Each structure stands twice: as structure tokens, then as C-alpha cells.
Image: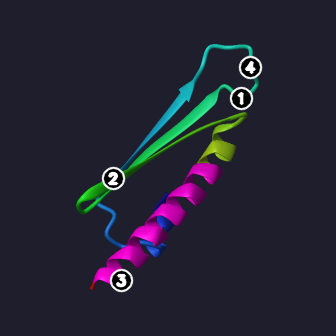
Amino acid sequence: MDKLDMFYDKVIKSDVYLKVENTSDKENKIFEARVSVPGDSFIVKKQCKTFEEGTDIAVASLERQLKKRKEKLRAHS
């Protein structure tokens, strides 16, 4: 999550939740993250076989969202 600062330096805070669903399904690990930036927040929720896999996918998704927000803010400046 620390590397998100490379893409958008105005991250106020991030909350991460790790959950295990009580099912026989192998993809029972849930990674959820909420990243707060000035005036907005981004929420990503991924369900995978491992928390590490969920973390990687969620962080990649957050990177794209933060890059898009940064580009949008630059266009309005």
C-alpha cells in the first residue's frame, strides 16, 4: 500500500480489511481497502485464494484509479 504514494502523493489514509469467508470454496480470502484522498475515497474489494494475491490485484486497481484521478485534476488545472 505504501507504493501508492508514488502515483498520488495526497493520500490521507488507507484502511485495509482482511476477511476469511466460512465456505468450502478455495477463493475464500477477501481483501478490502479504502483509500482516502482530499474530497474522495476509493474502495476496492477482491476475493482470491490468498491474501497476497488479493493485495496485488487490489493495489493494481487502486494504482489505476489514483493515476486517473491525478490526470483528471491536471486537466482541470
Q: Nearer the viewer, mark 1 or mark 3?
A: 3
Based on the displayed image, in which of its 4 quarters is residue 37 positioned? bottom left
Spot occupied by residue 39 in the image (x, y as percentages of width and height): 23, 60
Q: In the orientation shown, which residue stands out farthest toward the front?
A: 76
The CA distance from mark 4 to mark 1 is 5 Å
Comes first in the chain, label 2 or label 3: 2
Q: Nearer the viewer, mark 2 or mark 3?
A: 3
Magenta region includes residue 59: yes
* Kind of residue at badge 4: Asp
Quadrant where the C terminus is found in the figure: bottom left
Spot occupied by residue 40 in the image (x, y as percentages of width and height): 29, 56
Query: Which residue is label 2 attached to?
Result: 41
* Kind of residue at badge 2: Ser
Could you tell whether 76 is left or right of 55 in the image? left
Helix, strand or loop under label 2: strand
The CA distance from mark 2 to mark 1 is 26 Å
Helix, strand or loop under label 4: loop
Comes first in the chain, label 1 or label 3: 1
- The answer to the question of whether label 4 and label 1 lie on touching residues, with beta carbons closer than 8 A, is yes
The CA distance from mark 3 to mark 4 is 45 Å
Based on the displayed image, in which of its 4 quarters is residue 71 positioned? bottom left
Q: Which residues are magenta?
A: 56-76
Query: Which residue is label 1 attached to?
Result: 27
- The answer to the question of whether label 2 and label 3 lie on touching residues, with beta carbons closer than 8 A, is no
Label number found at residue 25: 4
